[in-house]
Image (cartoon, coloured by chain):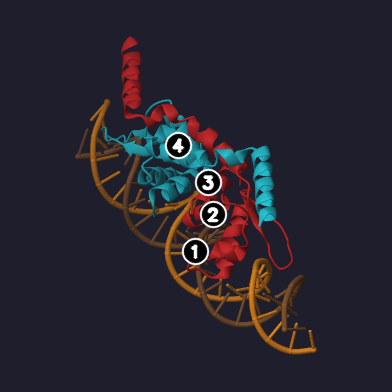
Chain colours: A cyan, B red, C brown, D orange
Amino acid sequence: MDQLSATFAALADPTRRAILARLTEGPATVKELSEPFDMSGPAISKHLRVLEKAGLITRGREAQWRPCQLDATPLKEVAVWAENYRRFWDASYARLDELLTEMKENEQ
Amino acid sequence: MDQLSATFAALADPTRRAILARLTEGPATVKELSEPFDMSGPAISKHLRVLEKAGLITRGREAQWRPCQLDATPLKEVAVWAENYRRFWDASYARLDELLTEMKENEQ
DNA sequence: GCTGTACTTAACCAAGAGGTTAGGTAACCA
DNA sequence: TGGTTACCTAACCTCTTGGTTAAGTACAGC
């Protein structure tokens, strides 16, 4: 799977996005990250694995803890990708596009 | 499923992203959209359904054609979401963050 | 060395995703 | 009317996802 697909797939789960949001406040242990969720430990472990595979977090090793840290690098790619569609966000631009298409068709 | 999750899930497939890219050049029929892919018609239909459910495309009805049109509105939410992580993209900022955390800890 | 805590692995399960083929429906065209 | 084109639905298959419980590993502290 390509990087961008992996990133989008990782971000498609609200639990994982919440974990990323938490990590913006600084590194955290698995236990700390799992606290807000009504979910078993292994479930959180799996989410963290997905995030790690997507390169969105890095994991350390300190005694019995495995601290997680945010790595937002892949999100830059996401932002850049989305930016390419900026001109299509605004409905008025969309209408203008339609108008231009119509005009083109009438030319032929 | 919430809007943002649906959008990210829809974008996690390269075929669907390619379809969106094609639609930036203007509306297209299902046949036209399926041409670049070595994939059956129903497979494309399913991808279009996912994109439609995520609000990324709208579909018309003209004789035997079902023209698709880009609706990039949900991508604005994606861009805004990603923007919130901008300050974490740059490694030097990450280091600065670590430094600040350390300084805070030493204060206490 | 024993006990508790943090975390992972393994095995399992239900549901969903992404593809297929076969068979519809609807519109155009001769 | 009959054929062709565009597209969808239905049924099916396989692999993945997101969750579970049970059991295992690694470390800290008494």
Q: Secondary structure at mark 4?
A: helix
Vertical arrangement, residue B14 with respect to residue B101, above or below: below
Given this view, does label 4 or label 2 mark the residue nearer the observer? 2
Characterize the local packing of mark 3: few (<14), some (14-19) or many (20 or more) Cα atoms within 10 angstroms. Answer: many
Residue under numbered circle 2: B22
Asked whether disc 2 touches disc 1, contact meaning CB atoms under 8 Å apart, the reply is yes
Out of D7 and B42, give the one closest to the viewer.
D7
Structural distance between the alpha carbons of marks 1 and 4: 44 Å
User: Looking at the picture, which amino acid does disc 2 mark?
Assistant: Arg
Q: Secondary structure at mark 2?
A: helix
Q: Residue A53's spot in the image, x, y percent?
A: 36, 47
Residue under numbered circle 4: A34
Q: Residue at x 61, y 63 (%)?
A: B30
Residue under numbered circle 1: B36
Asked whether disc 3 touches disc 1, contact meaning CB atoms under 8 Å apart, the reply is no
Q: Give the number of callouts.
A: 4
Identify the chain of the residue marked 1, using the numbered disc in the image.
B
User: Of callouts 3 and 1, which one flags the residue occurring earlier in the amino acid sequence?
Assistant: 3
User: Looking at the picture, which amino acid does disc 1 mark?
Assistant: Pro
> Can residue A35 be spotted in the picture?
no
Out of A68 and B42, give the one closest to the viewer.
B42
Given this view, does label 3 or label 1 mark the residue nearer the observer? 1
Q: Secondary structure at mark 3?
A: helix
Asked whether disc 2 touches disc 3, contact meaning CB atoms under 8 Å apart, the reply is no
Structural distance between the alpha carbons of marks 3 and 4: 23 Å
